Every structure is written in C-alpha cells, then in structure tokens.
Image (cartoon, rainbow, N blue to C red):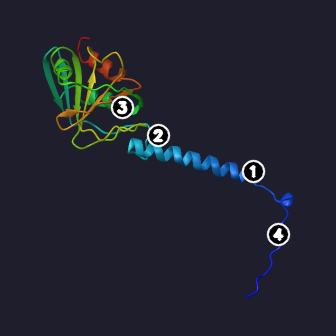
Amino acid sequence: MLRKKTKKQPTDQLQTNTLGMLAAVIGFVLAAIYGTLTLAAQDPAWFLTGFDERPTRVVVYQSGRRIELQAGQPGFDELAEAVRSSLAKGVSQPTGIGLSEGSLQDAHSLYITLEVFFDRPVKLHAWFNTDRPTRMLFPITGRHSEAPIVFLGRGDKYMSNAPMLKTVEPIRSTLRSLGFVM
C-alpha cells in the first residue's frame, strides 16, 4: 500500500489564533468556576437574589411570651412581607454559626426572636449551600442579633453555618411598628 505524501508546512509559516485560544481558556475557567460553585451551593441559580415565598405561620417571641400569627390575623401580612423583603435583598456570606439547644431556648424565653414556617421547602439563593429549609429563625435582640443572621431549619432542627443576610431592618422596623419593644 502506498502512502500519499503530505506536504508539511514549515513551522515559520504557522499562524496561531491567539484570540481564539484566549477565549477558549477564559471560557473554560468561567465554566469551571460556575460548575464548582453550583455543586457547592447545590443550586444552579446561586447567583440570583430575590425571594418570593410567603410563610404560612409566624411566631414572635418576646421575653418568654409566644405570639403566633397566621394568615388573616392582624400583623401577619406585615411580618410576612418584612421577612420576604429581608430575604429578597440577598445573602452576603456564611457565618459558621450554629444554634445550640441552649441558644434556641434563650431565643424563645429571653429575647425578641422571629420564627417563620413554610408549608414546603424553600430555596434561599447563595454561593454556598443553604439547603431547602422549612423554617427560619431571626434573632432580633440578644445572642447572635448583632449581625443580620438567619438560622435555617428543617423539621424541628436548625442547621449550622447560618447565612448572614444583607439586612434584617425591614423585620426590625415592622416589629417596632407592631409594638414590640427592643
């Protein structure tokens, strides 16, 4: 069998498509970063902000008093909107903070705390994993209230690594307007 001779091009006449190569490398790096963050966050839309879910039940704790509000009761719509507004502004970072049983008891009996419940798991978009909580706890006074932290939970347990929100001021001002002293 005869081989057909191919003309070899001298290397000094080769042209390199530098722009195309640079675009391919940048595209690969961006895809790798996006893929890594997507896997870590378990959320392909981790870069989005916004939150449109509405809680089904809201509980305000103030110095051992427990006030539960549901849809239709005075104050519920205002607090549900304040929670949605705070969460819609987005998450800034993970805190590494968890909620011990003692801290949870103190939040319920000593401080002002807002706890909200959803009828199904919800997603809080962030560049780290926030799971799909069915309940959230916002410390308003006392332990962990110095930063805008929200503890996320499922069932009767709260997870560690609570996210820091960009703000909880809508919740604070709504609680003040409803007569809760801070």
Dot placed on the residue nearer the N-terminal end, 4 or 2: 4
* Amino acid at pointer 3: Leu
CA distance for labels 4 and 3: 63 Å
In the picture provided, is 178 more to the left or to the right than 38? left
Q: Which residue is mark 3?
A: 87
Q: Secondary structure at mark 1?
A: helix
Rendered view: 146 above or below 161:
above
Q: Secondary structure at mark 3?
A: helix
Rendered view: 134 above or below 83:
below
Dot placed on the residue nearer the N-terminal end, 2 or 1: 1
**On the image, which quarter does residue 94 sit in?**
top left
Q: Quadrant of the C terminus?
A: top left
Judged by depth in the image, the label closer to the viewer, 2 or 1, is 1
Q: Where does the image place residue 84, in percent across and percent down from the top left? A: 33, 32
CA distance for labels 4 and 2: 49 Å
Label annotation for residue 18: 1
Q: Where does the image place residue 19, in percent across and percent down from the top left? A: 73, 50
